[in-house]
Amino acid sequence: MTVSYSLSTSRAGVLTFPRLLFRWRGSIYKLVYVELFIYLMFYFALSFTYRFALNAYQRTLFEEVCGFFSDIFLDVIPLSFLMGFYVALVAARWWNMYSAIPYIDGISQIFATYIRGNDDVTRMQRRSLVRWITLTSTIVFTSVSPPVLKRFPTCLHLVKAGLMTESERKTYEHMPTPHVKWWLPISWCCNLVGRLKADGKVDGEMADLLLKEIQAHRQACGAMMDYDWISIPLVYTQVVTIATYTFFLAKLFSSQFLESSTEVDLYFPIILVFEFLFYFGWLKVAEVIINPYGDDDDDFEINYILDRTYQIGLLIVDDCYDMVPELEKDKYWVTPDFCLPNCKSTTADNQGKAWLGSTVPGGLLLSAKHFILGHTWN
Amino acid sequence: MTVSYSLSTSRAGVLTFPRLLFRWRGSIYKLVYVELFIYLMFYFALSFTYRFALNAYQRTLFEEVCGFFSDIFLDVIPLSFLMGFYVALVAARWWNMYSAIPYIDGISQIFATYIRGNDDVTRMQRRSLVRWITLTSTIVFTSVSPPVLKRFPTCLHLVKAGLMTESERKTYEHMPTPHVKWWLPISWCCNLVGRLKADGKVDGEMADLLLKEIQAHRQACGAMMDYDWISIPLVYTQVVTIATYTFFLAKLFSSQFLESSTEVDLYFPIILVFEFLFYFGWLKVAEVIINPYGDDDDDFEINYILDRTYQIGLLIVDDCYDMVPELEKDKYWVTPDFCLPNCKSTTADNQGKAWLGSTVPGGLLLSAKHFILGHTWN
Amino acid sequence: MTVSYSLSTSRAGVLTFPRLLFRWRGSIYKLVYVELFIYLMFYFALSFTYRFALNAYQRTLFEEVCGFFSDIFLDVIPLSFLMGFYVALVAARWWNMYSAIPYIDGISQIFATYIRGNDDVTRMQRRSLVRWITLTSTIVFTSVSPPVLKRFPTCLHLVKAGLMTESERKTYEHMPTPHVKWWLPISWCCNLVGRLKADGKVDGEMADLLLKEIQAHRQACGAMMDYDWISIPLVYTQVVTIATYTFFLAKLFSSQFLESSTEVDLYFPIILVFEFLFYFGWLKVAEVIINPYGDDDDDFEINYILDRTYQIGLLIVDDCYDMVPELEKDKYWVTPDFCLPNCKSTTADNQGKAWLGSTVPGGLLLSAKHFILGHTWN
Amino acid sequence: MTVSYSLSTSRAGVLTFPRLLFRWRGSIYKLVYVELFIYLMFYFALSFTYRFALNAYQRTLFEEVCGFFSDIFLDVIPLSFLMGFYVALVAARWWNMYSAIPYIDGISQIFATYIRGNDDVTRMQRRSLVRWITLTSTIVFTSVSPPVLKRFPTCLHLVKAGLMTESERKTYEHMPTPHVKWWLPISWCCNLVGRLKADGKVDGEMADLLLKEIQAHRQACGAMMDYDWISIPLVYTQVVTIATYTFFLAKLFSSQFLESSTEVDLYFPIILVFEFLFYFGWLKVAEVIINPYGDDDDDFEINYILDRTYQIGLLIVDDCYDMVPELEKDKYWVTPDFCLPNCKSTTADNQGKAWLGSTVPGGLLLSAKHFILGHTWN
Amino acid sequence: MTVSYSLSTSRAGVLTFPRLLFRWRGSIYKLVYVELFIYLMFYFALSFTYRFALNAYQRTLFEEVCGFFSDIFLDVIPLSFLMGFYVALVAARWWNMYSAIPYIDGISQIFATYIRGNDDVTRMQRRSLVRWITLTSTIVFTSVSPPVLKRFPTCLHLVKAGLMTESERKTYEHMPTPHVKWWLPISWCCNLVGRLKADGKVDGEMADLLLKEIQAHRQACGAMMDYDWISIPLVYTQVVTIATYTFFLAKLFSSQFLESSTEVDLYFPIILVFEFLFYFGWLKVAEVIINPYGDDDDDFEINYILDRTYQIGLLIVDDCYDMVPELEKDKYWVTPDFCLPNCKSTTADNQGKAWLGSTVPGGLLLSAKHFILGHTWN
């Protein structure tokens, strides 16, 4: 459900960023419109009470309260500070959480290259390895991501979906440990590699690389569990939330138009709305990316990654097994000094301008040629 | 004792962050309520003295002192600056401290794969390796984490808990060095690997990988000792603490309601309380995570990690040894182009929409087809 | 199309940075002049309306609106804050995106060293490997970079350019998966290595290194796809954009010269222009580097990298295959203590001054010699 | 001489940080009390001159100067900005400088495992390798750390301390190069490994791992030399220093109590003292950690690390050589589902609560069970 | 030409940082004095014009202009913000650029260990490998660093300096590619390794390690080329430059002493000078380190690194080839529990105080001993 806008930003122009403002999925509007609506309800409730319901004495009182809350205006600065540092922390974590998601391409290519044979047993071995790797991913994904859990709520679903066999399910469920068991299929993979080596089907170096790739997968899964377990300290998130809510609570009063004011009465608090968009938008950045394994518009599409994992994994180890295109002499067989063809739009700027280091076009080389050898050095 | 709130933040909604404000464990309230109570005691003591105990001259004096401390208000900004940078430093360190905690899954899977045999001697070898690895972790954990030391205060406890044998304890305690000896069980592991290799039970590549995994474990343990030894420079922590306490000392006076003031008298310093929550909450973030191996609500549950380490370690090398499920032809044996089943909630958005790169859906490919080959390039 | 100015900044002088202001390609002027022009149009439209078209009552109203927007001035600070953190995030990502672009030098050198033979078959094997690696890069580049897609809009263009054979194209297009297929040529490479090993042409260690290099290439390509897919959360970009545009919308009014003002009337809003350059320039930094695989003056020249990749790759595996210059005794064969010759300009400062550690020139060593051995230690 | 306060911060409580204020070693007081004293001398000298020595006209002049310097107050903010970024840079570097210090545990464990034999020659080989590794560390340490140079000011001291033999010293000193020679013992190590391999005492894989570990040690030593050589650009440190000193020079005047002032006269500039502590404390953070290989209270205890290096290194390769405790059946030999014993204090919270992923306790799993298989997917 | 001040900062004292202010090489004064002089010229020109040349009306106008520019004062804050983030980006890059410079120690030690033999051919092989590695470095250095290009402006100089043979030069210059050819000597190295392996002079594992080290060197060289090619986006540097210059242009007017002012007239704008030092100093930090391969006082001494590279490289592979000191029984042969000797100054603090983890000195261990085994656990 990731919202990509790479293409729209491939060229910086007048409309590059403004155009992004007209998106709805993953947008600031979609994220804050409910809050903004509720907030304005409160604002106008107060406003109408003040304007139409209060008597003179109550108005004075109300105005004093509003004046009191204006003091807190000064705190604008610490709020944006706190937010800046908090969002920087969350954003760094967000990308690491993406990087932790394991892909299957590498490991299955090693399976395909090192476990050779096209008989049914070998194919089953390769396919089972891919299935177990996918199974590990799936168990971890269901543990950390609600959308994946919704899709595979029980082991029976995994069996039904073909990710687990019935006998594997039994072994899995009877493993005597209270801890989460996502490492079990990894263990099966390693054990199978161990057997293949004992049987002489793979040799020492191959087993080594196979095990390393499996370990890398296990490590990535472990990292996902870690990010899920160790949240950013709750107190930090609470401080940020309290600060933002307090700020806008104070604004509710201090932004009211008062009769004693000398300013123009706009009825609608336009600046307040922009401030709301600004600060709540910033807070929403943190909310959206603090757990990107979830359901938000901008969260990682883990269900899609899972689909791709199993299908591509099987393709690589089975359909593409030992597939090598017929070797041919390529187009540049006899012309070492060639250049790939260019279309007009790509040649204008850089055709023929190879990068030779910054010092070279600077004229230094030319003048340097005037140095007479033997004289340049002392 | 880690406070996780990943699930609550999996979807960004109106109540996502507000709901977090109603937690108690690890919360800002639990962390600052004592300080706040004491602070308010002082505040009201001053307030009542001023209102009821002082004569006119003393009041004037008191008001002058309060006015004097208002000057320091300007320093609001440097305080939040200092705090921002300090907490950023501590938070980066905090995650590195978590990452340093070694897990046993990887190393025991290598033990299980490479040290083959189901006889008692081989089983003892594998189990002893896991035990020694766990023992190393335990010794390091007791050295850096008070809760673990409370659980295993002496070597006798380790023996009693089955992590050390009696003879190992003697060797350990008689090792002639004043330095901490957590590396000794690591040394036993390496020596056992050395013997296995000398005996031809493991070959060169296997010993290599075994040693590398053991080294990785040793390195993680060393990193934990390092983080424990090298604290953030004391002077930095002191500067932050002094700044915060001075700031609120000044506020104690400057926030008093004075008779000469034209503002409304609220009796209760509501804004001050929010400021207190804000700045002390921020400071508490640092306090909680500066040594996350400790006792706080939000510290890492090292005792739990230890339990898991030994049990899972033994499971992998012994109960799961050479366990490979019966290989079967999987569900997609003959259908390479398949998709895992979807439940309704997960298909709405992304069913069938594979990610092909940002440039592809942008229309470029389509219009590009109109290029006539041979004309596009010059 | 990268704009390099390394040479101009190799020496910090009075004119180093000012001189950079007179560049056009990739410059702030080129990036914001259209916006600035439009913005000034609006400014003067308002200005002329106020000065010439409005009657007295309307002018008062207009002045009140302008006064109203002056309030937002205070928000200058949060804007630069937000911008600072946002640009820091984007800039870190920008360099990672460059580092993700795979170069072919390393992998083709390994091909050349380990796949030995100068017969046509072996040459075809090496050249095909290079071609497939290049092909993978090209497919990924077309998926993430509009200029490369413009150059190679279809597979037919790839065939025509000699990056793919006709039969490969068919295999590629008939691969039964909806997902992007850039991993397929990687799979061919691995399979060819697998066959070479099965044929005994490369041994275990060689295959290992070959596969690792191929995996590294695959990983780099995957990283490029990831950066393309996972944009910085849209809401962050929107918050920054809205903040900037709102700020200058308010400035449109608050910067108007009003008759009631006591300041000098400059007619041209010189300060506003500088502010515009400043904030829009900062925003443009983000716009330019948020997707550096694109078309901007400062984006990476991926088409050029592609040219280099294929040509250098083939040179290394084929033309330079087994090329070792005749070994000779070098100039310093009998003089171990030599120094490379220096020209005058490079000897002034550091000739003969080897770096021996900071403590050595400090005099400590000298005085230390006065220690009498046996006395220094207790 | 590192000041550790990990234990004091293991639990965040009311007194956690305040208690740190009562430390002396490495404290802000110890670091700034001299500066503060000198500064107050100047302050009071000016103060007394103004109050007692000046005539009316001179006083007016003095007051004008003081007023003039008050302007600079506004610059408070840039100062804390500059400081924040500068200290962040220095602090990141500080930890990297710690991480660069090489430990010997890993490398000596590899020596012990791979160079087998208990005869005198083999023991000498292992012990010499450890000694050369320690020697390299020592030479680098003397080059970068004044306390270590004080301990070992000449090669003769190294010989005397048993780190170098007399003949090694001669070889070392006659090596014909002006550059620092810390790499020489590393070269001896590699050459010995080369000989062991040539003699068939270690095989290919072993030599590989041995060389890699030696290279890692060399790299760490090189990094220490680099950090010593390449300081943070001098101009940055100067800007920070000038800014701080200028700020307090201005404060010297602007903080004077003037007769014309309407504020209360406190005689002692209490706020100024706090500001001094604050900004000079912050600056001292940078001063203390900018070269942590030095003499400060908070610098790394390199002499101690050196002691540990050599003793533990020899212990591992010699006394612990081939030491493997008698293998026994462990306590949980027949009970795979066990838990390590708990003391009361550690069980309260987390006993039996294994972490299963954030999604699991959230109720999703339960409700999910109501899905009827076959209905959940479409 | 690096300016090191590590020794001066090894101990934080009253004079540590102030003393640094009296350096000239690499100092802020050396970097900004020209700018400051020019700037003051302009300032006084304006000042004298105002004081002596203008009539009353013109003076009023001038004062209005000055007042106008005072508005921009508020922008002090954004400027320091922008500068802080910009310098942080540049400084991070600066250290990475240093780390990219390849050292030869590691690679030549591997050459010396693995390519065995003392005959002329083998020596030539080792020496040629070192020469080609150095040659690669040199070509890259000339491409990115003006001082190195000045030293070796043409290939002829390289031949003359003994880094290239005449026949190599021809091969190099006739290589049919427009791209920079620094990878060619790397290719020769790999090819030679390939031949050595084909000849059976090195075996598989050795070739592996040799190739990996060569690749690491190639990667470092590539990184240097990358840093040279991909500058920080020009627009960012321009924004910072424009902001600084505009700020001081406005200051030129707003800092003028006006007759209407009530402040004391100092004639010399002392505060302005400090501000100039502050902001221009900060900007100069960026200017100095944005391309540290250049000519500045604080740039890396690449010519020196080159000298060291070739000499040390040859020493290691040739003079130190197979050099192993006579093995002796070391001083602590029979005393495993020893401590290296200490001089008085180093024993005061830490003698005998081994670090055992933070929890141990805290008293926990002591009280823990009172636990009676069997009672502590439930």
Image (cartoon, coloured by chain):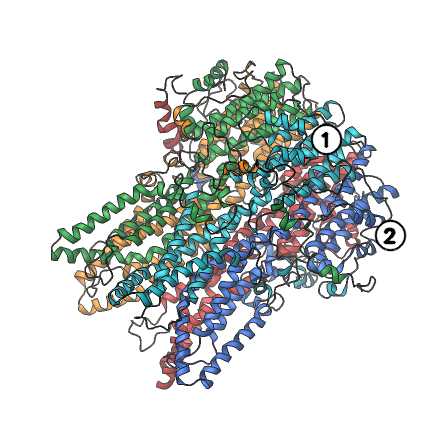
Chain colours: A orange, B red, C green, D blue, E cyan
> SS for tag 1?
helix
The image position of residue A122, as x and y in percent, is 61, 20
In terms of depth relative to the viewer, which is nearer, E120 or E149?
A: E149
Q: Does any portion of residue D274 appear in the rendered image?
A: yes
Location of the C terminus of chain A (image quadrant): top right
Q: Which residue is mark 2?
A: E334
Task: Please name the residue that numbered disc 1 is placed on.
Answer: E206
Question: How many other residues sit within 10 Å of disc 1, few (<14), some (14-19) or many (≥20)?
Answer: many
Between E187 and D127, the one nearer to me in the picture: E187
Chain of the residue under label 2: E
Q: Is residue B309 left or right of residue C274?
A: right
E95 vs E368: above or below: above
Label 1 marks which chain's residue?
E
The amino acid type of the residue labelled 2 equals Val
Instruction: Please tell me which residue lies in front, A275 or D266.
Output: D266
Toward the right, the furthest residue is D120
Residue B158: percent from left, percent from top: 71, 52
Q: Is residue B354 visible?
A: no
Name the quarter where the N terminus of chain A is drawn: top left
Along the polypeptide, which appears first: circle 2 or circle 1?
1
Q: Are marks 2 and 1 in contact (CB under 8 Å)?
A: no
Please provide percent x and percent y for residue E368: 68, 61
Q: C182 or E220: nearer the eye?
A: E220
Q: Is residue E126 above or below residue C363?
A: above
- Residue D164 is tagged as none
For image coordinates 20% across by 51% down, the residue present is C47
Q: What's under tag 1, amino acid-wise?
A: Met
> Mark 2: few, some, or many residues within 10 Å (few <14, many ≥20)?
few
Secondary structure of the residue carrying numbered label 2: loop
Q: CA distance from mark 2 to mark 1?
A: 37 Å
Q: Which-is-in-front pick, marks 2 and 1?
A: 1
